[in-house]
Image (tube, rainbow, N blue to C red):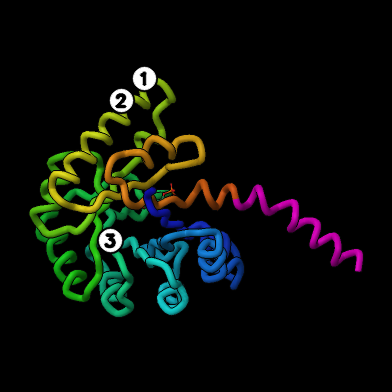
């Protein structure tokens, strides 16, 4: 069974909406661990729109499962990664205007920058994954520059309509997964995975880690809201 890395960025997004101290992603990480998360994933973005430097620092001390830091190659976050040494780093492209990571990293077009980031992280003892579109040329380039793992971008699969469209995207993922296995790298996947579409991706041969955020936090709001309202009613009544 693949491991589940729970991405808790959205918890920090809610906190940052009020620039306050709650909800605290550190609490969320603890609850995710209690729920069985095999890893905690955070993306420290250049614009700090959700996860903050303090979160990385405290989570590094408190997370007892794998801490996976998503980061871009070419900014000050790389220095913070080398300072706090997460168990794993997932290198992603980053654009200021995007709502979420839109595409995979272009290793072929940015070979030197990505190679430099991989080397620094690996020298610090961090396992390095590359977030790549399911594209064999990108995967092979990733192997050549020393990546330990590839996280296949499942965004197009997640957006595809169930039926022929999704079957086509699944075939693309299967081909890419075979390339990752052939290259001897660890196989991860993530982006847009939810309660309806996770099954086939979890079943890909050799899949060892899935990183899921939005759907889990969205579901947590729904399963937790009734209790939260009742607790507030009780306090008002008291
Ligand atoms: N993997 C990577 C590299 C990501 O950037 C994200 C989004 O931050 C995820 C996985 C999780 O995607 P989602 O929130 O859609 O589950």
Label annotation for residue 168:
2
Residue under label 3, please give it: 72
Of the numbered discs 3 and 2, the one sitting upstream in the chain is 3
**Residue 230 counted in the magenta span:** yes
Of the numbered discs 1 and 3, the one sitting upstream in the chain is 3
Quick check: marks 2 and 1 in contact, CB under 8 Å?
A: yes
Residue under label 1, please give it: 164
Secondary structure under tag 2 reads helix
Chief SS of the magenta region: helix
Disc 1: residue Cβ within 8 A of ligand 1's nearest atom? no
Label annotation for residue 59:
none
Which residue reaches farthest right?
237
Quadrant assignment, res 126: bottom left
Which residue reaches farthest top?
164
Disc 3: residue Cβ within 8 A of ligand 1's nearest atom? no
Kindly identify the residue that appears in the image at 27 percent across and 36 percent down.
Answer: 173
Return the residue nearer the eye: 8 or 80.
Answer: 8
**In this view of the protein, can residue 46 be seen by the observer?**
no
Image coordinates for residue 6, horizontal then vertical, percent: 45, 57
**In this view of the protein, can residue 165 be seen by the observer?**
yes
Q: Characterize the local packing of mark 2: few (<14), some (14-19) or many (20 or more) Cα atoms within 10 angstroms.
A: few
Image coordinates for residue 215, horizontal then vertical, percent: 51, 46
Residue range of the region highlighted in magenta in the rendering: 220-238
Distance between the alpha carbons at the discs numbered 3 and 2? 30 Å
Image coordinates for residue 148, horizontal then vertical, percent: 19, 59
Secondary structure under tag 1 reads helix
**Residue 32 counted in the magenta span:** no
Kindly identify the residue that appears in the image at 31 percent across and 30 percent down.
Answer: 169
């Amino acid at each position: 069974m693949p491991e589940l890395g729970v991405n808790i960025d959205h918890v920090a997004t809610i906190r940052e909406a009020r620039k306050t101290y709650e909800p605290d992603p550190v609490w969320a990480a603890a609850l995710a661990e209690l729920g069985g998360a095999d890893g905690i994933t955070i993306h420290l973005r250049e614009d700090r729109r959700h996860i903050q430097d303090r979160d990385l620092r405290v989570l590094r001390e408190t997370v007892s499962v794998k801490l996976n830091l998503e980061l871009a190659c070419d900014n000050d976050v790389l220095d913070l990664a080398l300072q706090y040494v997460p168990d794993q780093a997932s290198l992603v492209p980053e654009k200021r205007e995007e709502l979420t990571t839109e595409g995979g990293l272009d290793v072929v077009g940015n070979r030197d920058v990505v190679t430099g980031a991989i080397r620094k992280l690996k020298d610090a003892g961090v396992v390095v994954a590359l977030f790549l579109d399911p594209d064999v040329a990108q995967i092979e380039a990733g192997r050549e520059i020393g990546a330990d793992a590839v996280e296949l971008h499942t965004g197009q699969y997640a957006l595809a309509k169930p039926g022929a469209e999704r079957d086509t995207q699944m075939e693309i993922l299967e081909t890419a997964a075979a390339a990752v296995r052939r290259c001897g790298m660890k196989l991860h996947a993530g982006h847009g995975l939810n309660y309806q579409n996770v099954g086939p991706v979890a079943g890909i041969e050799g899949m060892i880690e899935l990183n899921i955020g939005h759907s889990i936090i969205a579901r947590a709001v729904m399963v937790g809201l009734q209790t939260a309202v009742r607790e507030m009613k009780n306090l008002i009544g008291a």
